[in-house]
Image (cartoon, rainbow, N blue to C red):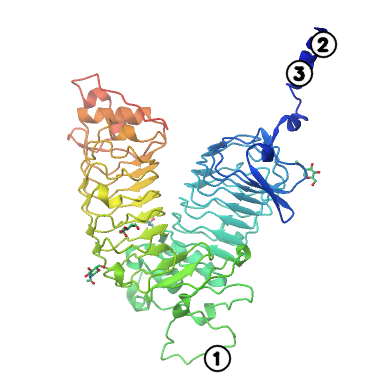
Amino acid sequence: MLNNILLLSVLTVTSFPSKTDSRKTSKDICKNRCSCEEKENALNINCENKGFTTVSHFQPPQNKISQLFLNGNFLTKISPNEFLNYGNVTSLHLGNNGLQEIKTGAFNGLKNLKRLHLNNNNLEIIREDTFSGLESLEYLQADYNYISAIEAGAFNKLNKLKVLILNDNLLLSLPNNIFRFVMLTHLDLRGNRLKMLPFAGVLEHIGGIMEIQLEENPWNCTCDLIPLKAWLDTISVFVGDIVCETPFRLHGKDVTQLIKQDLCPRRNPGDANHRAMQPPSDSQYQGPSPTLRPRVTPTRAPKASRPPKIRYRPTPRVTSSRDKHVFGPIMVYQTRSPVPMTCPSVCVCTSQNPDSGLNINCQERKLQNISELQPKPSYPKKLHLTGNYLQTIYRTDLTEYSSLELLHLGNNRIAIIQDGAFENLTSLRRLYLNGNYIESLSQSLFAGLQSLQYLYLEYNIIKEILPHTFNSLHNLQLLFLNNNLLRSLPDNVFGDTMLTRLNLRNNHFSHLPVRGVLDQLSAFIQIDLQENPWDCTCDIVELKNWMELSSTSVVVNEITCDSPSKHAGRLLRSLRNDAICPETDEVPVTKPRLP
Ligand SMILES: *[C@@H]1O[C@H](CO)[C@@H](O)[C@H](O)[C@H]1NC(C)=O
Ligand SMILES: *[C@@H]1O[C@H](CO)[C@@H](O)[C@H](O)[C@H]1NC(C)=O
Ligand SMILES: *[C@@H]1O[C@H](CO)[C@@H](O)[C@H](O)[C@H]1NC(C)=O
Ligand SMILES: *[C@@H]1O[C@H](CO)[C@@H](O)[C@H](O)[C@H]1NC(C)=O
């Protein structure tokens, strides 16, 4: 009996471990949940798709330099000290976890971490303290998130950071001095919402860059872009295509092909117009250094009047016909040798690395039919068909494009999309159909697009959306329907999506039901309802209540009443319910759906 009591008290003591022996009581991750293997003096801890929501109760084998693979789990939030036991992990893979939040101190203890992969998650912001403690970090990958903001100082303590991969996010701009304390060699900002990059505070700090990717941003080619263009002229590294989105007169033009005068016309326009597409002068071209790639510059004929210059640089400029076989520049991170590729003859193809597939640029080639693209490209990943004359997307057009992740069909004349045309594009994440003549949307249009996250349909003439149109888009997060002719939406139209951004600006909505439409949206939605002819009568009270009960981030931009005339021009927010609807005081209240 006494023995038993003694044993019990021993157990009681050991079940409250002190901080120092918490490690001894935590379970060895290799013996419990994951498979581990020794490879080239490091231990690979494979915990992919194992249903983890936390790993803090486990610990890896001591004294071993490790790589920890945690992709495809359910780590939606990383709590402080989550990785305290993982001090010898040098590479941490957290992709595909639905990760939304990284708490302050989440990476405490990872002082040997060199590579951090956060790709394909739901992150929206990088805070000043998000990466605190990662003093050895060299490589940070956060592509395919929803990052729209980076706080100033976020990278200040990452003094060893060399590679920063942020493509396919929602960045509108970069904060001042963001790279002041880092010496980046590689920076990927493709597929964001950047309109310009200033020299002061941004470009001035990345002079040592070996590769910078800026494609697929909506560059605003005005005077403000001159610093970027001038900076591009001083570097001799691969940048990718920088194509103007705005203003209209420069839409689709490559910035490196423009002159200062195009970007920033003088008041007196008389002397400038005919020079619109004149390429930069030879003196602006810096020959490639032996270790760096030249920037891709299309061929240009020398002006007849100008005597040919004697070239003393041995390396010829890369011409557009050779561009079709350009291989990716991130050689440092490439383990396999490039494989040959096929590119449609009218297009220019590039590739980041052999595994990532082809980026095919066929913008403004006067194409009338996708079937004109011959020969068919090998392993296409991104297909840009912006600014052509496409009218119909035939069912068979995309049969051999099932590997596509991005399809840009913006600014064509598309009025007809045959049923099932996209049905095998199961990897497609971004689809641009903006600036076409689409009138109606139905379920068969988007069938099969199970990976689609971003759908751009703005600037069409969409009058109606039929029931179930977005039903198969279970991963849809962003939907732009602004600048169309919509008056109503069918019941439950967003019920199967995961929308966090919805743009309904500039349509013909006078009223939008909450029940069955807005209450299907998550509490995290950002929705733009501006520039619609809102009718501020009894029916709108439900919408007003919904807005007021939603968190502050829910409705972006104001709702302005159009009718009745006594409220015209007034903000819905500023009106009292009894002023809008004197007859009733009982209006149903519906809260936003919680995730
Ligand atoms: C890391 O490994 C070293 C020896 O290689 C060992 O001394 C140290 O305790 C380990 N640290 C952690 C946190 O596991
Ligand atoms: C582009 O820049 C100009 C000048 O700064 C500005 O007036 C215009 O609104 C910008 N356009 C867009 C689409 O941001
Ligand atoms: C475009 O392609 C479709 C099918 O691929 C074909 O039926 C049609 O005749 C083509 N149209 C033109 C104008 O070439
Ligand atoms: C999609 O794939 C299926 C099976 O391979 C095939 O039968 C069908 O014709 C394809 N559809 C399109 C539009 O390419």
Q: In this view, does 269 lie above or below 525?
A: below
Whether the residues at callouts 1 and 3 have beta carbons within 8 Å, the answer is no
- The kind of residue tagged 1 is Ile
Disc 3 element: helix
Whether the residues at callouts 2 and 1 have beta carbons within 8 Å, the answer is no
Which percent across, then down, holds residue 568? 21, 37
- The kind of residue tagged 2 is Asn
- Residue 108 in view (yes/no): no
Q: In this view, does 151 lie to the left or right of 107?
A: left
Q: Nearer the viewer, residue 297 or 38?
A: 38
Which percent across, then down, holds residue 300? 43, 82
Q: Residue 11 carries which label?
A: 3
Front: mark 1 or 3: 3
**Residue at 26% from the left image edge and 47% from the top image edge:** 443
For ligand 3, which image quadrant applies? bottom left
Labels 2 and 1: the sequence-earlier one: 2
Q: In 3D space, how far apart are the residues under numbered discs 2 and 3 (Cα atoms)?
A: 12 Å
Q: Which of 520 and 233 is in front in this view?
A: 520
Labels 1 and 3: the sequence-earlier one: 3
- Residue 77 occupies quadrant: top right
Q: Mark 1 points at which residue?
A: 310
Quarter of the picture holding the N terminus: top right
Q: Which mark is residue 22?
A: none
- The kind of residue tagged 3 is Leu
Which percent across, then down, holds residue 292? 61, 72
Q: Name the residue under label 2.
A: 3
Q: How crowded is mark 1: few (under 14 residues within 10 Å), some or many (20 or more)?
A: few
Q: In this view, does 535 lie to the left or right of 46?
A: left
Q: In 3D space, how far apart are the residues under numbered discs 1 and 3 (Cα atoms)?
A: 87 Å
Front: mark 2 or 3: 2
- Residue 54 in view (yes/no): yes
